[in-house]
Image (spheres, helix red, strand yellow):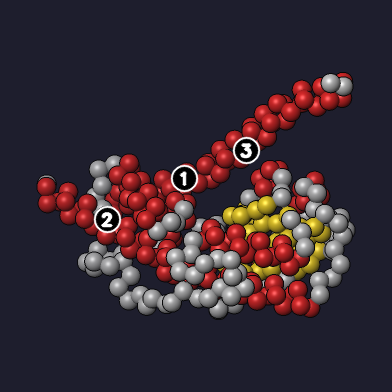
Amino acid sequence: MTAAAAGTADEDPERREVLRLRAEVRDLRARIRTHPLISQAQGMLQERYVLPDADGAFALLRRASQRYNVKMRTLAGAVVTTPRPDARTVLWFPQRVRRPEPPLDCMEQVPSGGRSRGAVLGAVLDRTLDVVGTDMGNVQTVDRVSGQLRIERHTGLTEDFLDFFAYVGEEGTSCAKAARDVAQVTVRDVESDPVFTEPAREAILAAGSRACHSVPLTARSGVCVGMVSAHVDRPLDVLRTPQLRALGALGAEAGRWLAWHERTVLLDALEYLHALGRTQRAARLGSG
């Protein structure tokens, strides 16, 4: 073995350990951001359904999360931000009108019926990267608690990039501008485009991205409910009209589906949670 090869072999375990530690730190930061929200939801459920402790409330959240394949953080956010149910009614949303699942013609690889939110977001990202012609990108959704864009799916991006852009506000990035204007935004050269703050520009360049294109995911009402962005490792030419049209159709289709999922599947999870809570409350009051 040559000295260079030996040096590379010696560095591999160190490199793996650095990557492991970075992933661990990112996971801890995510938990720190999530834990207060889940704790708040636990407290609300404990008081609402006369549960004996926070563990009982967590068990309700976990059952509803697993039954409807909704992330615990998403469900907790819905509990915290949704007006509490009327104590006199069996249903949380007695006047709710159910709508059929909208089609996803732009994402034929996602089977119809029982689509998971994660699968749809993954398909949105794959289709966007295919249209733009790159292998780096991410999908964000609007966080219902903070109102910021939050990364949910990604590929080809560094851990530092994901940590820096875990949450994005209203200024300083192309995706923030696309969300604010509800319009596609092309950055042909990250190094010179004025849309970025300097810290954001440095983080993007450090990840190997030299250009990007952001597409808002819009509900039928025109409200931005998410964002998909493609990153390119070279300055980007202006996208052709057929590409822009394809991405616009994808953004509208995905946005309508996400809005439907929130009005249907997420509310189903809340309704189930309410039914579980009422059952436990009745059992405790009856035994008392």
Residue 56 falls left or right of residue 70: left
Tell me the SS state at disc 1.
helix
* Quadrant of the drawing holding the N terminus: top right
Q: Is residue 83 above or below residue 163?
A: below
Q: Mark 2 or mark 3: which comes first in sequence?
A: 3
Q: Is residue 113 above or below residue 210?
A: below
Q: Quadrant of residue 239?
A: bottom right
Q: Of the residues tagged 2 and 1, which is closer to the observer?
A: 2
Give how far apart the Cα atoms at labels 2 and 3 are.
36 Å
Which residue is most to the front? 1
Residue 67 falls left or right of residue 23: left
Q: Can you tell which mark lies on residue 36?
A: 1
Amino acid type, label 2: Leu
Q: Is 77 or 100 nearer to us in this picture?
A: 100
Pinpoint residue 249: horizontal percent, then vertical percent.
Answer: 65, 76
Q: Is 168 or 273 nearer to us in this picture?
A: 273
Q: Is residue 174 visible?
A: no
Judging by the rendered image, the residue that carries numbered circle 3 is 23
**Residue at 68%, 34% in the rendered image:** 19
Amino acid type, label 1: Pro
Q: Is residue 264 visible?
A: yes
Judging by the rendered image, the residue that carries numbered circle 2 is 276
**Residue at 25%, 43% in the rendered image:** 52
Packing grade of label 3 (10 A; few <14, some 14-19, many >=20) is: some
Tell me the SS state at disc 2.
helix
